[in-house]
Image (spheres, rainbow, N blue to C red):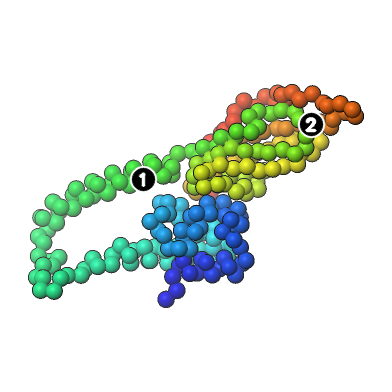
Amino acid sequence: MEELKDILKSERELKGLSLEKLSLITGIPARFLEYLENGRRDKLPPDTYVRGYLMKLAEVYSVDGNGLWEMYKREKGDRLSSGAKDHFPGSHSSEKSVSPWRRAVFSAPAVIFAAAFVYIVFQGSGLIRPPRLIVKFPEADSTVNNPEFIVSGSIFEGDSLTINDESVFVGDDGTFEKRFTLQEGLNEFTLRARTLLGRETVAVRRMRYVLSPPGGTAPISEVSQGVDETSTVIENNQ
């Protein structure tokens, strides 16, 4: 039976996409795409993220996202349950030999541990925190006389980024860099970092491009646009 990893790799190759190109299209870090195609579930983020990744891939591949998700859960469950009911030859122990009282005594700590583990995972995985968005360049609105322009910074690992609604490639360490050619006059750049649960952090930068006068260089100075905030958390309830 064909496994999920084989389907994902086959669909990507049919589309003629590299992992890097697919990462750019979907906003999924390239290493997570590689882990999915290699069946390295132990290297993947929490299942909430994985489900989002599979749904995005399903859109690109024009396949059923729920089908991919069910296959992932089934394969993951099979691995976890493998050998759970095996017994050594000659062993007379069975689940029926364990009394309900002992079962309750031993299961209570397990439930407490599981609850604590889930809480820690949710805290650590960033599912309940707003995404981080640090714009290293430009630090503020300004006026320039060079049309070639770079926007750079960093976000949390696993989040996606768009600039003016265009997906931007993010490195494994969360850093990004995007080149632009400025138009004469005011150019506005809206950066949005987004988690899979729809939380957003937004930063806006305005750059004014002024042509250099003949035989000289236009002075470069900051332009005050009255924008003090560098990030705003937005809840997406859709």
Horizontally, residue 168 falls left or right of residue 111, namely right
Q: Quadrant of the N terminus?
A: bottom left
The picture places residue 158, in percent across and down from the top left corner, at 49, 47
Kind of element beneath mark 1:
helix
Say which amino acid is labelled 2.
Answer: Asn
The picture places residue 23, in percent across and down from the top left corner, at 57, 54
Q: Nearer the viewer, mark 1 or mark 2?
A: 2
Marks 1 and 2, how far apart at CA: 48 Å
- Name the residue beneath numbered marker 1: 121
The picture places residue 134, in percent across and down from the top left corner, at 56, 35
Structural crowding at the residue carrying mark 2, measured as other residues with C-alpha within 10 Å and reported as few (<14), some (14–19) or many (≥20): some
The residue sitting at 10% across, 74% down in the picture is 90
On the question of residue 165 being in view, the answer is yes
Please, which residue is most extreme toward the right here? 214
Between 68 and 184, the one nearer to me in the picture = 184
The residue sitting at 9% across, 70% down in the picture is 92
On the question of residue 66 being in view, the answer is no
- Name the residue beneath numbered marker 2: 145
Q: Is residue 43 above or below residue 127?
A: below
Mark closest to the chain's N terminus, 1 or 2: 1
The residue sitting at 13% across, 51% down in the picture is 105
Q: Is residue 211 above or below residue 40?
A: above
Q: Is residue 9 above or below residue 117?
A: below
